[in-house]
Image (cartoon, rainbow, N blue to C red):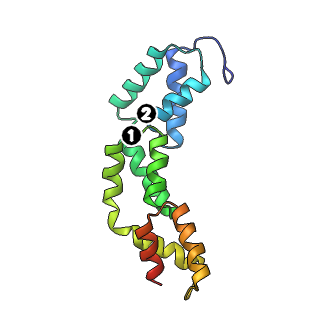
Amino acid sequence: MGEGSSEQPSAGEIRAFAYRLLGRREYSVFELDQRIRRKWPQLESGAAADLLEALVNENLLSDERFTQSYVRMSIQKQQGPLKIRAALRARGVADALISSELDCHSDGWIDLAAAWLQRQHAGPLDFDARKKYYRRLLSRGFSHDQAMDALNSL
């Protein structure tokens, strides 16, 4: 069955599609729902909701696991908490879950920003370079205080 097909898929087809997606990486409930609806726009809402509920009950789909995985991947990319929070919100993850996961890493944000800064520019920075790297740290998702502490640590 092709992308965007108009006929109603069977429950087995929807489940197989979800398994294929979940076999590659973790998804949030909202994100998987969007992927299913994009593939089958005419799908009855109850069919997708029933499948998602079953996957959650079987522990194959978990917003908590997705959030942990996404935060870990973003930290490896040296992204800050503000950018990570915005990306997780866009993927339908609850704010309480985002906050609890980001709080687990709260002691390492300044070190992460300083490590990124050290990779970009070794040695002392003049005023213009400090402005440039301050803006770049903000665009990577670090707060003002985190960016300033990282800059001052050089």
For the residue labelled by badge 2, is the local secondary structure a helix, a strand or a loop? helix
Q: Is residue 134 above or below residue 71?
A: below
In percent of the image, x 50 and y 35: which residue is there? 31
Q: Position of residue 54 (x, y in %)?
A: 37, 24
Q: Is residue 60 above or below residue 112?
A: above
> Between 33 and 11, which is closer to the camera in this rendering?
33
Residue 29 sits in which quadrant?
top left
Q: Which residue is situated farthest in the bottom direction here?
A: 124
Determine whether label 1 and label 2 are within 8 Å by CB: yes
At 58% from the left and 86% from the top, the residue drawn is 126
Q: CA distance from mark 1 to mark 2?
A: 6 Å
Q: Secondary structure at mark 1?
A: helix
The disc placed on residue 63 is 1
Tell which circle, 1 or 2, labels the residue nearer the N-terminal end: 2
Residue located at (45% from left, 45% from top) = 88
Relative to 5, does residue 138 appear above or below in the rendering? below
Q: Amino acid at mark 1?
A: Asp
- Badge 1: how crowded within 10 Å, few (<14), some, or many (20+)? many
> Which residue is farthest top?
7
Give the quarter of the figure containing the N terminus.
top right
Amino acid at the residue labelled 2: Val
Task: From the viewer's side, name the closer residue of 12 and 109.
Answer: 109
Name the residue carrying label 2: 29
Q: Is residue 70 left or right of residue 123?
A: left
Q: Give the number of the disc on residue 54.
A: none
Q: Position of residue 70 (x, y in %)?
A: 46, 50
